[in-house]
């Protein structure tokens, strides 16, 4: 189940929101993540994801949340790591072969794993 996100806050309600053609446009609309915070894409903004799913899906308020910088950096490090569960591939490369829904659910699990 997808957890809707609006401007970086989980609401628990289904939200249909328009995405943006770029992360810069998302940031222009929503502003900075805040002191000690960074914006985090649940489904990464990789070129392959942008071309496969479209920028409006990737730069969508339902896919972007605010995270404390330290947690965001730990998660980014995890996505760059090689794991047994990902057939000894870099996590982000392994995810590259998966659907948007799978990547989103996996991203939520990673957030939980890192205490968010």
Image (cartoon, rainbow, N blue to C red):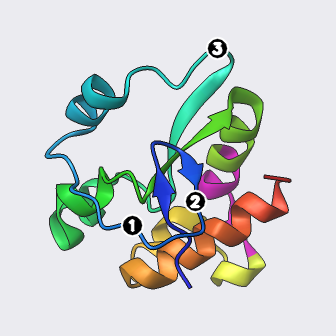
Residue 94 visible in image: no
Image coordinates of residue 11 in percent, x first then y, are: 58, 59
Image coordinates of residue 31 in percent, x first then y, are: 38, 22
> Circle 3 is placed at which residue position?
35
- The nearer-to-camera label among 1 and 3 is 1
> Circle 1 is placed at which residue position?
15
Q: Secondary structure at mark 1?
A: loop
Q: Secondary structure at mark 2?
A: loop
Image height of 6 relative to 98, above or below = above
The residues bearing labels 1 and 3 have C-alpha atoms spaced at a distance of: 26 Å
Image coordinates of residue 105 in percent, x first then y, are: 58, 78
Residue 68 visible in image: yes
* Mark 1, other Cα within 10 Å: few <14 / some 14–19 / many ≥20: few
Please report the residue visible at 45 percent of the width from the left and 20 percent of the height from the top: 32
Q: Which mark is residue 116?
A: none
Image height of 87 relative to 80, above or below = below
Q: Of all residues shown, which one is farthest toward the front?
A: 13
* Mark 2, other Cα within 10 Å: few <14 / some 14–19 / many ≥20: few
Quarter in which the N terminus is drawn: bottom right
> Circle 2 is placed at which residue position?
11
Q: Which of these two is toward me, 28 or 84?
A: 28
Using the rendered view, name the quadrant where residue 10 is placed: bottom right
Is 60 on the left or on the right of 74, as rendered? Answer: left
Mark 3 or mark 2: name the one nearer the start of the chain. 2
Is 72 on the left or on the right of 99, as rendered? Answer: right
The residues bearing labels 2 and 1 have C-alpha atoms spaced at a distance of: 8 Å
Taking the magenta stretch, the answer to whether it contains residue 80 is: yes
- The nearer-to-camera label among 3 and 2 is 2
Please report the residue visible at 19 percent of the width from the left and 46 percent of the height from the top: 20
Image height of 103 relative to 19, above or below = below
Image height of 34 relative to 15, above or below = above
Question: Which span is picked out in magenta?
Answer: 77-83
């Amino acid at each position: 189940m997808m957890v809707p996100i609006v401007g970086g806050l989980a609401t628990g309600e289904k939200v249909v929101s328009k995405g943006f053609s770029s992360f810069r446009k998302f940031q222009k609309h929503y502003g900075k993540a805040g002191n000690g915070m960074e914006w985090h894409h649940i489904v990464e903004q990789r070129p392959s994801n942008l071309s496969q799913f479209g920028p409006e899906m990737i730069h969508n308020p339902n896919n972007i949340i605010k995270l404390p910088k330290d947690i965001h950096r730990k998660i980014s490090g995890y996505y760059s790591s090689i794991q047994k569960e990902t057939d000894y591939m870099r996590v982000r490369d392994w995810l590259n072969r998966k659907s948007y829904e799978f990547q989103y659910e996996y991203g939520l699990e990673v957030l939980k794993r890192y205490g968010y």
